[in-house]
Image (cartoon, rainbow, N blue to C red):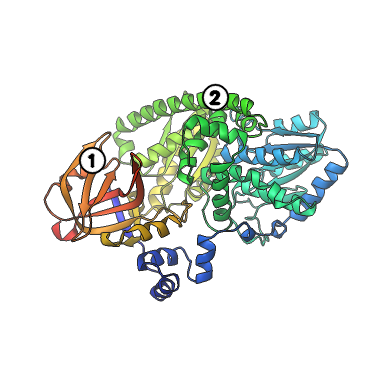
Amino acid sequence: MQKRWAEQELKDLKAVKELQEQLNIDEVLATLLVNRNITSFEDARSFFRPELAQLHDPFLMKGMDIAVSRIQQALLSKEKILIYGDYDVDGTTSVALVFGFFRKYHYHIDYYIPDRYKEGYGISTEGIDYAHKNGISLIIALDCGIKSVDKVEYANGLNIDFIICDHHLPGCVIPDAVAVLDPKQPDCSYPYKELSGCGIGFKLVQAFAMKNSITFQELECYLDLVVVSIASDIVPITGENRVLAKFGLKRLNTSPCHGMAALIEITGKKQYTISDVVFTLGPRINASGRIDDARHSVNLLISENRDIARAHSHIINIKNTERKEHDASITEQALAMIAADPDLLKRKTTVVYNEGWHKGVIGIVASRLTEKYYRPTIVLTQSNGQVSGSARSVIGFDLYEALNSCSDLFEQFGGHKYAAGITLKTENILALQERFEDVVSKTIPDELLIQELVIDAKLQLDKIDGKFFRVLNQFAPFGPLNSTPIFISEQVTCIGHALVVGNNHIKMTVKQGDSKPFDCIGFGLGESLDIINENQDFDICYTIEENVWKEKRSIQLNLKGVRRTPQHQ
């Protein structure tokens, strides 16, 4: 796929020079910091040396005092409490964390995950009825509920109180719950707005602990759950999330809970980064809710026995295999559908529908189609007498606003700028295809339909040495708004022959002027072989990583793109 190479503009050269001098680092590394809004020595120290003391006081969050007081009242009165959460990774880790914490102090506690197919996303009438039937008087909703105005009203009529812990954007009306914890709600002065749902749950138990003289050390065992939610829900790795992610990864890699340890055992991977969580642990935890029942994941994550955890992890791994099979099959069908339709090929959107597709994987398929054709995409299927859809966007285009323009066609929709879920009637599918195409065509700039490769800085290869790499590694954990830096080096030459290996991957060795040679791997870049073999200088963009082969460690360039040097074009 064609990509636009776009170098980030330097925000403040003066700040770069000052930081370079204060930290005694290369100018390129100082540039990376300034472009991440780290402009002082103190900022850099906090960035490179995150501490748990940097976490904000949870009582700064609107509604926290009331939430903690209501929970304390429930514990004193021996009320039954229900921990309610969504069926994805963020929801199940949230439930595992809050349930796992409060069961230490309260016997009358249960949890509930809605059925993806029978109840759908968010707080359901069925869930409230379950609470009413079982004499539950307090529901703590996690990773959902900020728009559930009618459901909370229904619960109020049954004398069931709600505490909502959500991180999604609120609607025009806030639910009439006992307490609503959401940093994105109006008049909430909490300093950090980008916590995951599980992060909000963690702040709730942190506040309860502070109020009840429970040490923070007793909460650290939950940080592996928090980092898995942060990674899987693709929230920014900045501010408080960076602190939680840093210490969460440390926990995950040294002393994870029994459930995480059992999953890690199955994957065979010894050390985890944010990216590893996204591609190995996250999909497995998600799979049970996509294919069967998300309670498998919660039961895994709250296991207090290693053997029981192993049994749950094997079930989840089987569900993940099923998920991958559905994913591959539906993606193949959808790609064939697009390729066979000339009208669909030339559009600026993709909207595809098949009543037999598995609802649990259409979000993954939508992401794959967006990756292939790079345009706003909706994948639709039948579920419980209605059409359910998952939508994905391209960088820079507000999908939520586009769908809002089609909202009269929906029974329900929700989401954010880059991902959303919808339900509609079958008779509105064709209207959605046309309306969505019309709205997007009129509002999306053409350049947004070409994937952008954002380059952090220009780098001479002779600058890459052990010290440079060690400092670069301290930028981790990487993720949204702190992505692994991508560099460009111009006018490099290939030493010897470049090879296409495996599934269209490039392997070669390059140098720039008198620099030492660097081994390169370029996944899926086999089509670049022609440029490399022209016996001319060429440009590369890449990330820098460590390669370990037979216990020998070396620096390797992971290519993201190859192009002719402009003067040779």
Dot placed on the residue nearer the N-terminal end, 2 or 1: 2
Would you say residue 174 is visible in this rendering?
A: no
Would you say residue 13 is visible in this rendering?
A: yes
Which residue lies most toward the front here? 551
Total numbered badges shown on the rendered structure:
2
Name the residue tied to disc 2: 314
Name the residue tied to disc 1: 526
- In the rendered image, which quarter is residue 299 located in? top right
Residue 475: mark: none
- Asked which secondary structure carries label 1, the reply is helix
Q: Split into 4 quadrants, where in the image is the N terminus?
A: top left
Given residues 492 and 402, the one toward you in this image is: 492
Above or below, 295 against 169 in this view is above
Percent across and percent down for residue 555 are: 32, 50
Residue at the image position 83 percent from the left and 39 percent from the top: 159
Please state which amino acid type lies under the numbered disc 1.
Gly
Residue at the image position 65 percent from the left and 52 percent from the top: 172
